[in-house]
Image (tube, helix red, strand yellow):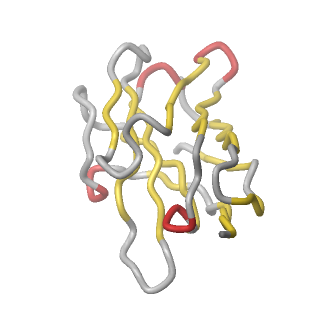
Amino acid sequence: QVQLVESGGGLVQAGGSLRLSCAASGRTFSSYAMGWFRQGPGKEREFVATISRSGTTTFYADAVKGRFTISRENAKNMVYLQMNTLNPEDTAVYYCAADTSRVRVSRNRADYDAWGQGTQITVSS
């Protein structure tokens, strides 16, 4: 059983930056891929970024490519999402998630079997 806790959300002006953190516990962190998803007002939860177990492979949603960076520190059981050049369309609840059963990274929400409680990001114009 994996437990995930996000932190780092808040209010930021358009063009600003934030870094989200996610602390994992309950299973060897380096044994599973991690992802970030988000759910905006009135929208379905969508893929943002994913990172492989070793951290060598990453994928991003087109909407955030070039602005967001996912990273992980296996020694600290942490995964991060650095978000730059934020715009109001990035306003959402952001969730970190763990995919404990696959070798390859996935963009599919259904492949993730552990979720954090979410952290709100609000970007003002």
Outermost residue toward the bottom in this view: 42
Seen in the picture, residue 80 relative to 93 is either above or below; the reply is: above
- 43 and 63: which is toward the camera: 63
Q: Quadrant of residue 99?
A: top left
Residue at 57% of width from left, 38% of height from top? 81
Residue at 47% of width from left, 51% of height from top? 114
Q: How many marks?
A: 0
Q: Is 34 placed left or right of 101 in the picture?
A: right
Residue at 52% of width from left, 45% of height from top? 1
Seen in the picture, residue 60 relative to 12 is either above or below; the reply is: above
Q: Is 53 placed left or right of 87 in the picture?
A: left
**Coordinates of residue 76 in the picture (x, y in percent):** 69, 20
Residue at 39% of width from left, 79% of height from top? 43
- 116 and 93: which is toward the camera: 93
**Coordinates of residue 54 in the picture (x, y in percent):** 42, 14
**Coordinates of residue 9 in the picture (x, y in percent):** 73, 56
**Coordinates of residue 55 in the picture (x, y in percent):** 43, 17
Q: Quadrant of residue 31?
A: top left
On the rendered image, what quadrant is the C terminus found in?
bottom right
Q: Is 111 placed left or right of 77 in the picture?
A: left
